[in-house]
Amino acid sequence: MDENFGRYAAHLAWRSRIAAKRWTRRAIFIAGSVVVGATAVLMARMADGAQHLFKHFLFLAPHAPLVITPLGFGLAALLVRHVFPNSQGSGIPQAIAALRIDDQAARTPLVSLRVAFGKIIVMTLGLLCGASTGREGPTVQVGAAIMFALGRYSPYRQAGFLLAGAAAGIAAAFNTPLAGIVFGIEEMSRSFESRTSGLIVGAVIAAGLTSLALVGNYSYFGSTSATLPFGVAWIAVFVCAVAGGLMGGTFILILALFAGALPGRAGAAIKSRPVVFAMICGLGVALCGLNGDASIFGTGYSQARTVVHADGAIDYWFAPLKFIATTLSAISGIPGGIFSPSLSIGAGLASALSLAFPHVPLGALALIGMVSYLTGVVQAPITSFVIVSEMTNDHAMMIPLMAAALVANGVSKLLSREGLYHRLAKNFLPAAGGAAIAGPPAANSRGLVR
């Protein structure tokens, strides 16, 4: 009798310890998701404030970007190299690389709180000086860093915390919970695991509720009722998808080229003078902005929204100028995402193609263009059409958006077998298996992606 009671007591104690660990993990997980949601809102407001201030500079001195933008790019590159290493670029490649690394200590340089803090500060600096970047990609790295830091106190699944933090970041940034889940599964993990999916959904819910409580319910581009008539108008889907896939694939090739060591004297000059190179890129962005619409600077959100709702004059030069400005901002090595600029480039592409398809509603063509170019860059077709559909609350366009995403994905793969984020993530991994880079990277001195 005493022996059976002892066994039962031991079993009960063991079960209690397991339950305590599970509830501890869940409590930490929920708290982390709430912090991610609040941080995403903070980053959105800081980004909006920085862009508003930059527009004020433009109003006071229209040619101010010729000075402000190069100097801002140079300062941002300097901070990335010497103060906040691994904060450069969009941040999504760093989060993907951290997921692929098993060693806890090796993950830390990629998703530490120091990196997250630097990401927020230097990303805001970039937008303050007119960089053609977004905040959504950086929110992914910041979300992963927050969950990584809190996950240290959790008994189970540290990698699951990273994945959930990244998904929560994108969901809170766009206010698109479904897209956050799809992004976590398709783009971040590239697989579906039932246990991990529960973490992702839970994180998206907690972060989304936090964002909802702070800023209310909203659609990123507002609600639209665009439709695409069945018939000849569907030719526009194919043409737009091919164009978006080619442009997206070209963008991947350019960034991949600059992520490695360029051959010859040009490569040596860039490697030895990364801050000067960043300033040259900033000057290029300034020239693009001064020769085009003022929305060439910053995220491009306002221009994309104008095209989606067809309530403004069409700027046919917006897409190529925004593409050049975004490319220069990306290869300069300063922190900043490409989600918002990619959506605006896609909308601009649709504006240009509207000349060939005057009978296709511009709003519908804009959604197709956004999905096409975004898919061409990230090669995550499901994420692309879900995020655009959810951002505009337009379910009538779901089938055309799916078709455009599939075509654009296939065309982009003709130029690059991997999407941008996964291709750049390799630069954060060791040449052979083992630990990741534990300090400031040396192979790419200007800090584009490493």
Image (spheres, helix red, strand yellow):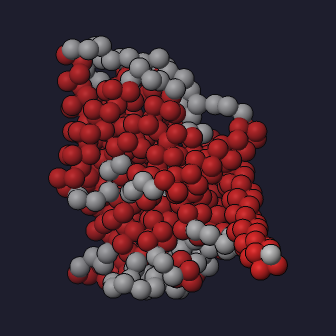
Say left or right for 8 vs 320: right
The image position of residue 266, as x and y in percent, is: 28, 77
At horizontal 23% and vertical 59% (from top left) the residue drawn is: 417
Residue at (30, 78) in percent of width and height? 261
Which quadrant does the N terminus fall into? Answer: bottom right
Q: Which residue is at 73% across, 64% downward? A: 19
The number of discs equals 0
Q: Is residue 370 above or below residue 310?
A: below
Q: Quadrant of the C terminus?
A: bottom left
- Is 448 in front, or is 111? 111
Residue occupying the point 24% across, 18% down: 233
Left or right of 267: which side holds 144? right
Residue 276 visible, this orientation: no
- Considering only vertical position in the picture, is 311 above or below 370? above
The location of residue 292, given as percent across then percent down, is 42, 40
List x then y, in percent, for residue 217: 67, 31
Residue 410 located left or right of residue 354? left
297 on left or right of 261: right
Picture layout, residue 120 above or below residue 209: below
Residue 222 in which image quadrant: top right
Outermost residue, right direction?
2
